[in-house]
Amino acid sequence: MNSVAASDLPELSEQVSSDSVAQVEPNSNAGLSGTSVPIPSANLSSGSSEYGSEYVGALGSIGYGAPLPLSPGDRLQLTIPGIGGEEFSGVYEVNLNGDLEVPYIPPLRAAGFVPEALEQQIGAKLVERQLFRPELLQLSVQVLDYSPIQVSVTGAVFDPGRLLVAQETETGAAGINNGSTQFPGDYPVERYLTSTLLSAGGVQPNADISRVQVLRGTQSTVVDLSGIITGDIVDDFPLIAGDQVIVPDKGVFQEKLVRPTQITPDTVELYVSNITAPTNGRNLEGDGDINVASFEYGTNLLQALVAAQCIGGTRSTNANRRALLIQTDAVSGELSTSEYLVQDLIAQVTENPNNAPLLMPNDAIACYDSGVVNARSLFDTVGDFLNPLNLLRSIFR
């Protein structure tokens, strides 16, 4: 429980005015308790969002492990012990306008602020209205449930669009329902930037992760996530309802981004067809000849062909098999096809491992028989046609 000291209250009353809140500096730690943390570079412009200027005032208040800013729908427990406190103590919910409505005081801006900053606002208003003596007032604000929030993700991600993140579990708490108990105040990790990017399918290999932009109303900040790849410390960015995330296109393919990380997928789903002769045991998953198979992100075409049993067996009949790779452009939706002789592909990769194409989500692979097998199949068909007894034997087997 946090106390509001008498000496602090006049100063707090000035701090919570709409004019001062709207001027929060990009690199300040307003509303955060504890040690100072590095703040990613931000370019904040003045203006108001749908929730008002105070709603976006906490945009620069970020840091690893910092409290999450509140969003509409979040449920809070307000506690004021002692005589008179029972009229105010209870469970409150941030309304759709981003305000918190407490009896006997005007609605207070809550969305975009951390709970500690909201405590200060409530305490200042209660004293300002002479509802409590400053030296006797103690209050606390505790988050009970984090509401699901809607954010949009655009740019160089595999599944851009509007996302509902931090969905509620069966217990009413926010987060993924994995059977674990959710305690009051537990953070839903989905409301952080890295988890949201992963929910959008992960960043593409052409993404500029050093300049990920978060728009909040008319204000914006740029977050550098390159430390996820280099191993440096990264301060994750907490999101609130209505945020827009833009991942810029760097214009080049970056192989370092084609591996499982916090912002890239762990696995990719590929369509695999291998009905070459013989077909026994060729299915990776399912019962059909065409399968949707999961591969670790970063798998190349040659590795997938080995897994699909398109490579190996009798050299005289299988060495000249052909493989077809079908890829879909994530932005335009256009299809591109590339055909490879398996034997040539092996030789190219032996010379330079980078010659094997890396596979992306929803790529399709098809394997074709070699010319020797095709010729043998043609001769078998002609033989069956010339000798009807062979056809009868195949029917009554």
Image: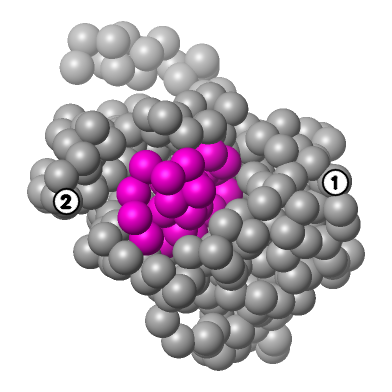
Mark 2: which secondary structure? loop
Q: Which mark is residue 258?
A: none
Q: Distance of mark 2 from mark 1, alpha carbons?
A: 38 Å
Q: Nearer the viewer, residue 241 or 258?
A: 241
**Magenta-colored span:** 108-134
Residue type for callout 2: Pro
Quarter of the image with the C terminus in it: top left
Residue drawn at x 50%, y 48% is: 128
Q: Nearer the viewer, residue 163 or 356?
A: 163
45 is higher (above) or lower (below) than 2:
above
Picture mark count: 2
The answer to whether residue 7 is left or right of residue 145 is right
> Mark 1 highlights which residue?
47
Of badges 2 and 1, nearer the viewer stands 2
Task: Specify few, some or many for label 2: CA neighbours under 10 Å numbering under 14, 14-19, or 20 or more.
Answer: some
Residue 131 in the magenta stretch? The answer is yes
Question: What is the quadrant of residue 35 in the picture?
Answer: bottom left
Q: Earlier in the sequence, mark 2 or mark 1?
A: 1
The answer to whether residue 315 is left or right of residue 344 is left
Residue drawn at x 66%, y 75% is: 28
Q: Nearer the viewer, residue 101 or 389?
A: 101
Residue 297 in the magenta stretch? The answer is no
Task: Specify few, some or many for label 1: CA neighbours under 10 Å numbering under 14, 14-19, or 20 or more.
Answer: some
Mark 1: which secondary structure? loop
Residue type for callout 1: Gly
Q: Nearer the viewer, residue 351 or 211?
A: 211
Residue 156, given in percent of the width and then of the height, sits at 74, 53
> Mark 2 highlights which residue?
81
Camera sees residue 293: no
The answer to whether residue 299 is left or right of residue 338 is left
Residue 132, given in percent of the width and then of the height, sits at 34, 49
